[in-house]
Image (cartoon, helix red, strand yellow):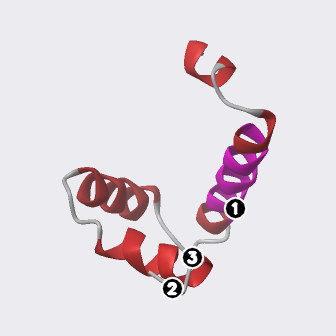
Amino acid sequence: MGKLGDLSDTQYRTLLALSAMLELLVDKGILSREELEQKAAQLEAGDAEPLRAISALFDPME
């Protein structure tokens, strides 16, 4: 809970929106929690390719 206090208001709102979207995707059966957990583990393990693709959407000069 202490980590939430370290977030700026913008970061908190972004995290809240992302959390809400993920919950909706799971609730609607589009993604499973297991798929989300697997992807998170994959990203944490160092597979940054999906992150680079997302970054390119926001900064096409990369």
- Tell me which secondary structure the magenta stretch mostly adopts: helix
Judged by depth in the image, the label closer to the viewer, 3 or 2, is 2
Q: Is residue 35 left or right of residue 24?
A: left
Which residue is at 42% across, 59% downward?
36
Relative to 62, residue 44 above or below: above
Residue furthest bottom in the image: 60
Dot label at residue 30? 3
Q: Nearer the viewer, residue 6 or 27?
A: 6
Residue on which the image places disc 1: 21
**Element marked by disc 2:** loop
Quadrant in the rendering for residue 30: bottom right
Q: Is residue 7 left or right of residue 43?
A: right
Q: Nearer the viewer, residue 10 or 31?
A: 10
Quadrant in the rendering for residue 27: bottom right
Q: Amino acid at mark 2?
A: Met
Q: Nearer the viewer, residue 29 or 37?
A: 37
**Crowding at mark 1 (Cα within 10 Å: few <14, some 14-19, many 20+):** few
Relative to 28, residue 15 above or below: above
Q: Are marks 3 and 2 in contact (CB under 8 Å)?
A: no
Q: Amino acid at mark 3?
A: Ile
Which residue is at 27% across, 52% downward?
41
Dot label at residue 61? 2
Residue furthest front in the image: 61
**Element marked by disc 1:** helix
Quadrant (top left/top right/bottom left/bottom right) for the N terminus: top right
Q: Which residues are magenta?
A: 12-24
Cα gap from disc 3 to disc 1, whole angstroms: 11 Å
Residue 60 in the image: state x and y as whole percent: 54, 87
Which residue is at 63% across, 21% downward?
6
Cα gap from disc 1 to disc 2, whole angstroms: 28 Å
**Element marked by disc 3:** loop
